[in-house]
Amino acid sequence: MIRLKSLTRFSLCTLLSFLPSLAIADTIVLLADEWCPYNCKPDSDAPGFMVEIASEALAPYGHEIDYQTLNWARSLHRAESGEVNGVIGAVREEAPEFIFGPPIGTYVDVVAFRSGEALDPDTITDHGNLRLGAINGYEYYGVVNDYIKSHGADRYIVQYMSGEDALAKNLRKLIAGRLDMVAEVRAVLEYTLANTGLKDQVDLALTDGANDIYIAFSPALPQSQTYADQLNEGVAKLRENGRFSEIMLKYGQETD
């Protein structure tokens, strides 16, 4: 307790002017599975550009980001129920009830094939029952989504992977001939291939155009809208002062 009568250097009004910022300073818990370069290993020098941008954007409001890893399906469930504050790396279609901050980067869907065997993704349905590697809980779009809808009931044709290193495991299955193609986001696939030494064994084929990607806050928590608004303001400032571009370039990402 502060004894107001003992205040000699500051007036009561000066003290009260500090209270709003102190009152809203929070630790914001955000979940996601590792999805480098968007979000990588927690508590490292390179936790991912979305983690770094969110941390710096929200720091002026007194907030700290506690980024933790969990598989994507469980991350969405825990955030939706309000157990944690939100998730990193969401798109609006997969979490329509969530409260979104500003877009932080973009993604482009691609399909990976063994080297020398790449197909036009628009023609994959013309080549028989190709085995597709996907990740449990992920939302897919365009031709990949159509393919999953057509063959999703057959777990031999659409094979789901979950847990840590799910993408790397799918890529190894692809190279071993146990899958015919793997669906992912271009930046994540390129990052994973470069860090697993598999780059020369895989060819990528683009599908749809670029889409925005977000940090999404829990629809069950009353402070979520405040966090989203503050993140929007903080990211705008980082763009203005050039820090946004600096962080993106650290991860090899181009900025607009």
Image (cartoon, rainbow, N blue to C red):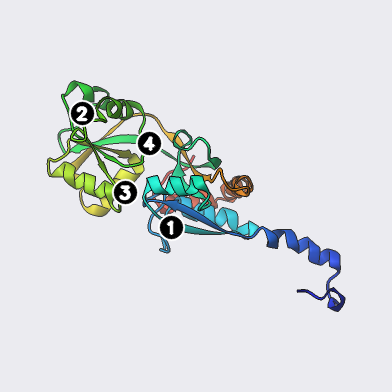
At mark 4, the secondary structure is loop
Label 3 with label 2: CB-CB less than 8 Å: no
Q: Could you say where residue 213 lies in the image, as x and y percent from the top left? A: 46, 40
Which is more N-terminal, label 4 or label 1? 1
Determine which residue is flagged by label 3: 191
- Cα–Cα span, label 2 and label 1: 37 Å
Determine which residue is flagged by label 4: 139
Q: Amino acid at mark 1?
A: Gln
Q: On the picture, is 3 further left or further right than 23?
A: right
- Cα–Cα span, label 3 and label 1: 20 Å
Determine which residue is flagged by label 2: 119
Label 2 with label 1: CB-CB less than 8 Å: no
Mark closer to the observer (3, 1) = 1
Q: Could you say where residue 168 lies in the image, as x and y percent from the top left? A: 25, 49
Which disc number belongs to residue 68? 1
Residues 139 and 206: in front is 139
Q: Quadrant of residue 180?
A: top left
Q: Could one spot residue 193 in this view of the protein? A: no
